[in-house]
Amino acid sequence: MACTWGANKNQSWNLTSVGDWTSVTTNGIAQNRTHGPTHELLTAGGSSVTTDVKGNITSLPTTLRPAGATTALLLTWDFDNQLASADINTIRLIRPNTSFIRGCCGSRIQ
């Protein structure tokens, strides 16, 4: 599968028969990925992706972060598997730490 946008920008993916990405190539730079038995992402570009017992990603390595990131993205999840916070200290495009508060019906209120 491949996609091209703009001048000299392209991306292609190699997929398994069940749809797991074995590699993605962006503008000629390949990144290999591995997946577990339930298709969860385990590694990307040689760096580990960590998850909690419910399968939520808790640490996203720099290989999956925007250019300029120097540390992993740390995520926390609430009881209902909704994103509770994201520690994005290395990218200053938005506030250094972002947290979410949800109301009694599950909608995000802050």
Image: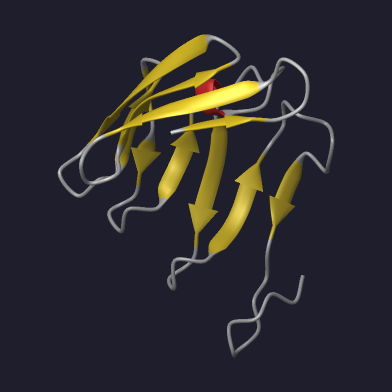
Residue extending furthest toward the bottom: 105
Which of the pair 99/19 is nearer the observer?
Answer: 19
- Toward which corner of the image does residue 95 lie, by quadrant? top right
Residue 34 as seen in the image, left or right of residue 67? left
Q: Position of residue 8 (x, y in %)?
A: 72, 15
Scheme of image coloration? secondary structure
Up-down relation of residue 81 to residue 67 (above or below): below
Q: How many marks?
A: 0
Instruction: Name the image quarter holding the N terminus.
Output: top left
Q: Position of residue 110 (x, y in %)?
A: 77, 70
Q: Position of residue 83 (x, y in %)?
A: 56, 60
Q: Position of residue 52 (x, y in %)?
A: 34, 50
Up-down relation of residue 15 to residue 56 (above or below): above
Residue 75 as seen in the image, left or right of residue 54? right
Seen at 44% across and 73% down, the residue is 80
Seen at 83% across and 42% down, the residue is 94
Seen at 75% across and 77% down, the residue is 109
Residue 93 as seen in the image, left or right of residue 47? right
Up-down relation of residue 103 to residue 59 (above or below): below
- Toward which corner of the image does residue 3 lie, by quadrant? top right
Up-down relation of residue 106 to residue 36 (above or below): below
